[in-house]
Amino acid sequence: MKKKLIKDTTEHFEKQFQHQPEALFLSPGRINIIGEHVDYNDGFVLPAAINKYICFAVSTNETGACMLIAKDLNDTYKFHINDTLVPVDKMWVNYILGVLDQLKSKGFPKKGFNIVFSSTIPMGAGLSSSAALECGFGYAMNKLFDLDLSKEDIAKIGQHSEHTFVGVKCGIMDQFATVFGKKKKVIRLDCTTLEYDYHNADFKNYSLLLLDSHVKHTHLTSGYNVRRKEVEEGMVFIKSTFPKVNSFRDCTEEQLLSIKDTLGPILYKRCHFVVSEIQRVLDAVQALEASDYQKLGQLMNATHDGLSEDYEVSCPELDFLVATVRKEPNVIGARMMGGGFGGCSINLVEKGTEKELISKVTEAYRSAFGIELSAYRIKISKGTAEFKNKLN
Ligand code: GLA
């Protein structure tokens, strides 16, 4: 699939521009084992890059003309490098322009470029195709124009693009995972300091299976930003009662409980989810290190319940998928993944039983919602990189 993606992207580039691309780049999607909606709440997360990618074929030119071609969308966007950049009405373009705008404000790049990109990351499935796009583009510019940006810079520029040109006040998890991904490793990221370490993504007798609800997370933008506001509001109350608490990381469940009435039911639920999720990630890292997969699965289950009931970012389809697989003894953990309001669930499934599980859930999902499920068996892969090898 990766080979075909690279081949198709390259051929499309050659057809459009009658020459070979100067360079090729691959930027992956991501999963998250646990730690949802805590990246913007001073928590820890446990994501990993996966073997689904956006491939970029790129070349530079001396004219200052820039052309972006989204092969899969059959869409093109042209501009001049000296143009003032503002958000446009094509969302896919904004991810890129938001990155370029920041590069330009740092004084580069000065030249033009042509880009063709194509993807195997399903869009709107909660696998961060947007972070792959932002960071893949940033990475390519960095390489081609020797911009001397660090990986951390590229991740932060991607995140900022989403804030300014796309309008989602996202955390840093997706961009960080895309750029820092490593084969067979999950990343434990401290979202306050951006310190990170890698842990073996070895689930022994279990495998990770994604089930795509095909509910596109169109409410994500508004829902996400509202959640951010709610927890910020909650934090103001918490800090005013407990001056020693600087962030959700320092806050205990007991403290929250003691100001439940002040917070009111909504803010209490939101803050309760955040405080308990931060602890769950730390417990999950320990479980992973101890190869205690049952424990890891239980934590994942608890995360789903929190996301669904306290944080209220799930949807009936995802709740159904999770409830259905939980009836199966071969599934030891299941939860919705990512920002929510649609997208995929992530499941820890006994190896060898995936096929049977997929056909059972597909059937049940079809009769409940009339939607055809997609299942992805993913591998944990390396982060954004230049592709230098010959294909054959
Ligand atoms: C989206 C955001 C991330 C993160 C997740 C939820 O994917 O882009 O920053 O907040 O939702 O964990």
Image: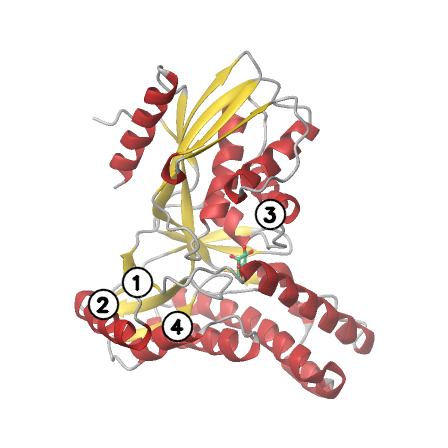
Q: Classify the position of the C terminus by image quarter.
A: top left
Mark 3 sits on what residue?
A: 166
Distance between mark 3 and mark 2 Cα atoms? 35 Å
Q: Considering only order in the chain, which callout, 1 or 2, is on the residue closer to the N terminus?
A: 1
Q: Considering only order in the chain, which callout, 4 or 1, is on the residue closer to the N terminus?
A: 1
Point out residue 261 in the picture as x, y percentages from the top left corner. 73, 88
| Nearest the eye: 76 or 232 | 76
Marks 1 and 3 in Cβ contact (< 8 Å):
no
Q: Considering only order in the chain, which callout, 3 or 1, is on the residue closer to the N terminus?
A: 3
Q: Considering only order in the chain, which callout, 3 or 4, is on the residue closer to the N terminus?
A: 3
Q: Give the residue at x 63% y 67%.
A: 227
Left-right relation of 360 to 95: left
Marks 2 and 1 in Cβ contact (< 8 Å):
yes
Q: Amino acid at mark 3?
A: Val
Distance between mark 2 and mark 1 Cα atoms? 9 Å
Left-right relation of 369 to 89: left
Label annotation for residue 317: 4
Q: Give the residue at x 36% y 57%.
A: 201
Q: Secondary structure at mark 1?
A: strand
Q: Secondary structure at mark 3?
A: helix
Mark 2 sits on what residue?
A: 358
Marks 4 and 3 in Cβ contact (< 8 Å):
no
Q: Considering only order in the chain, which callout, 2 or 4, is on the residue closer to the N terminus?
A: 4
Q: Amino acid at mark 4?
A: Glu
| Nearest the eye: 368 or 113 | 368
Residue 23, relative to residue 40: is it above or below?
above
Distance between mark 4 and mark 3 Cα atoms? 26 Å
Q: Give the residue at x 30% y 36%.
A: 5
Q: Nearer the viewer, mark 1 or mark 3?
A: 3
Picture quarter containing residue 146?
A: top right
